[in-house]
Image (cartoon, coloured by chain):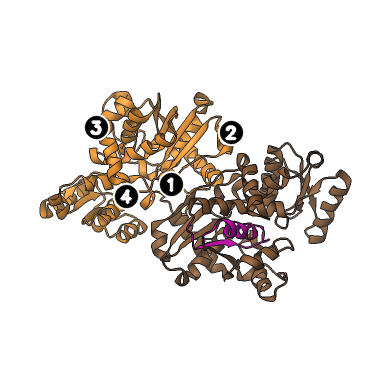
Chain colours: A orange, B brown
Amino acid sequence: MTKENLQACHNRIIPHIHNTPVLSSRLINRMVGAQVYYKCENFQRTGAYKMRGATNAIMELSEDQKQKGVVTHSSGNFAQALSLAAKSLGVKATIIMPTNSPQVKKNAVAEYKGHIIECEPTIEARQGAADKIVEETGATFIHPSNDNTVILGQGTACMELLKEQPDLDTVFCPVGGGGLIAGSALAVNYFGNKCDIYGGEPFEADDAYRSLISGKIETNKTANTIADGLRTQLGDKNFPLIKKYVKAIIRVTEEDIISAMRIVYERMKIIIEPSSAVAFAAVLKEKESFQNKKIGIIISGGNVDVNNLPF
Amino acid sequence: MTKENLQACHNRIIPHIHNTPVLSSRLINRMVGAQVYYKCENFQRTGAYKMRGATNAIMELSEDQKQKGVVTHSSGNFAQALSLAAKSLGVKATIIMPTNSPQVKKNAVAEYKGHIIECEPTIEARQGAADKIVEETGATFIHPSNDNTVILGQGTACMELLKEQPDLDTVFCPVGGGGLIAGSALAVNYFGNKCDIYGGEPFEADDAYRSLISGKIETNKTANTIADGLRTQLGDKNFPLIKKYVKAIIRVTEEDIISAMRIVYERMKIIIEPSSAVAFAAVLKEKESFQNKKIGIIISGGNVDVNNLPF
């Protein structure tokens, strides 16, 4: 995936996405001892960066493929993103959701006119249900994070950040399925100026941290983290990019995540989901290594139940 | 106060304030049937637009006055703003706060190095305490809303909004002490293009609504509103501007305020205080009159206890 691919992807999706603002806070800068720039994908359409990759994936389909629709399995932000991207582009989207998905998430998908098919809450059942739709309708399966068109789309957030702040020393991303950090790594490589990329990950779901050490994709036996977007694992499309470009993955505790989330709410006055707080928590944890540097953080999303904040 | 005064004020304070972003949401636009632009003063330093007026008021003092310091009475956002503005400009600020002010507000003032003097929670006691400081130290009293240098400073938020969105048909502001809407009215008059200005006010503290009808400054017997920033009353400096320029004041219920606040949290992903939700609630209430228009809203602040949200 070349610099031209990434630039072309951005040009393609730009009518369908927000160029989200980059915020900063002098108060937090003093707290960290560095200049920190927050790329606010919580303000993206559907409330998360996933809209970028979903839009690109659909736009890259042939007319014939578009007519047959798309399908994915997700109970999170990608479900909403693919639904809205499909609706905007006149394509039918089928979303496989486990029966135990919260009603609020099903409602969000329905609001964007995604067609929901429920399945048992196991990986086999959801893949089986998706395969069945592909077989029956000829729809194209789009993976939420392990797909090159999705990875490119997700990278456009970091690309926009670097165009606005070209002298960043470092970019921090949360790491879940690996799509965001792989795309961001491409953006840092093509548009950064001696810029590094780091990942933030919960100790409770530290598969990417362990994968970078072992050199192969590791899984999580459990994933008891509040950062619900980060409970997934890496894939064979994004892991090689992560291995090649990501300098390190910083692990944080659940307490670190909640504390970082609260600081962002109180000082930045923005609503972020716990997964986004993971990246900021990683910056706070390693702040001694980044004194007087310019740091970018991808605030990945803001889809959280404001009635049930963890503080 | 001329266009040149407002422009000069903006030039003066710009190194000390954020030029806050203007956000929008396609989803809320569809809900309202209009294009709505939110000037996010919740992202301003100290979390509210008050930083603008406080900074201008201090910068307009003579060197001799600056040496003797400033004093105000406020338990809200102006207390923090005057403290930080004074600290940034090397001036001493004394803040008169009622003994029953929440500890969190006293802490915020202390964090910005404001010198707190407590008084009994009555209007007479706080004015008396301020007069005593003026007498003893020669400090200059700066009123939170009824002061021309403050009014000009507050108007710069709306001026920035109109420079970014010059074709707004209408601007909505919350109305409390009247400083924000008076300054915004000047900005609309000088920088708007056939633009109107409306106020939003709680039924529970509708003194400005009644003042516009009677033609003289009315008071609130009670002010049992969640919009704690709007419990104050108009003054003789700002009321003439409000009378001259403000097209109407829209009153909203407490339920309207909480519902509007929740929509902003869930859809815009920003943290706003109830007073800011009043302006958005007024837009929602009168949306039939503004179909297909371009509407600006001054999101006045984001200082709210995230542990005690009203929903």
Q: Amino acid at mark 3?
A: Met
Labels 1 and 3 touching (C-beta < 8 A): no
Which of B130/A228 is in front? B130
Label 4 or label 3, whichever lies nearer to me, is 4
Dividing the picture into quarters, in which one does residue A33 lie?
A: top right
Mark 2–mark 1 distance (CA, rounded to whole Å): 23 Å
Rendering coords of residue B255 (x, y %) = 54, 68
Range drawn in magenta: B167-193
The type of residue carrying mark 1 is: Glu
Secondary structure at badge 4 equals helix
Q: Are marks 1 and 3 on the same chain?
A: yes
Disc 2 marks which amino acid? Arg
Q: Is residue B286 magenta?
A: no
Q: SS class of the residue under badge 3?
A: loop
Q: Residue A30: which disc?
A: 2
| Position of residue B60 in the picture relative to residue A21 (left or right) | right
- Find the distance from the CA under tag 1 to the CA under tag 4: 26 Å
Residue A1 numbered tag: 3
- Badge 4 is on which residue? A15
Q: Earlier in the sequence, mark 3 or mark 2?
A: 3
User: What's the mark number on residue A273?
Assistant: 1
